[in-house]
Image (cartoon, helix red, strand yellow):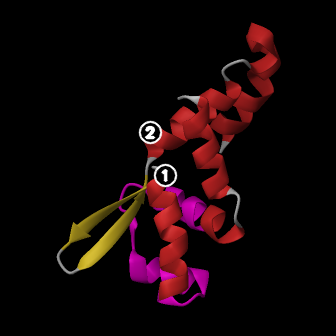
Amino acid sequence: MIDDDALASLAALAHPTRLATFRLLVRHEPDGLSTGQLVEAAGLTQSTFSTHLAVLVKAGLVTPEKQGRQMIQRANIDALRALMLFLAKDCCQGRAELCEPLLAELTCC
């Protein structure tokens, strides 16, 4: 991941609605949720929510897929993995033992 991609992802997640939406989609992988379900969960109007969803899609964090008459939104787990690796890549200047607590928290739950 390059700096610009990381910045776009972080900027997209830097809003409470978008962060909550992305976290909800991560919890619903691999099935995803319909746009209507996401609108309902967010408690926003369709048009307001669509703006937030477009930011997540443009950043590559969410992937829409048409299923019949519905649009199913899915978290792009590869993009999440890339962002996490980008942030932790230089963790502790190559001293992996200092990152072990972080890794332990990720694997415990």
Q: Is residue 95 visible?
A: no
> What amino acid type should be assigned to the residue bearing mark 2?
Asp
Q: Is residue 23 magenta?
A: yes
Could you tell me residue 87's position as x and y percent?
Answer: 68, 31
On screen, 47 above or below 75? below
Q: Residue at x 40, y 59 (%)?
A: 74
Residue closest to the far bottom: 45
> Which residues, given as a range, are shown in magenta?
21-46
28 or 19: nearer the eye?
A: 19
Secondary structure state at the residue bearing disc 1: loop
The numbered mark at residue 78 is 2
Q: Left or right: 15 with respect to 47?
A: right
Helix, strand, or loop for circle 2?
Answer: helix
Q: Dot 1 surroundings within 10 Å: few (below 14), some, or many (20 or more)? A: many
Please give the residue where the numbered disc 1 appears in the rendered image: 61
Instruction: Please determine whether, in this image, residue 86 is positioned above or below residue 79.
Output: above
The tag earlier along the polypeptide, 1 or 2, is: 1
Instruction: Look at label 1 and name its amino acid.
Output: Leu
Say few, some or many: other residues with alpha carbon within 10 Å of mark 2 (under 14 / 14 to 19 / 20 or more): few
* Residue at screen point 53% across, 36% down: 81
The residue shown at (17%, 76%) is: 68
Q: Magenta segment, principal secondary structure?
A: helix
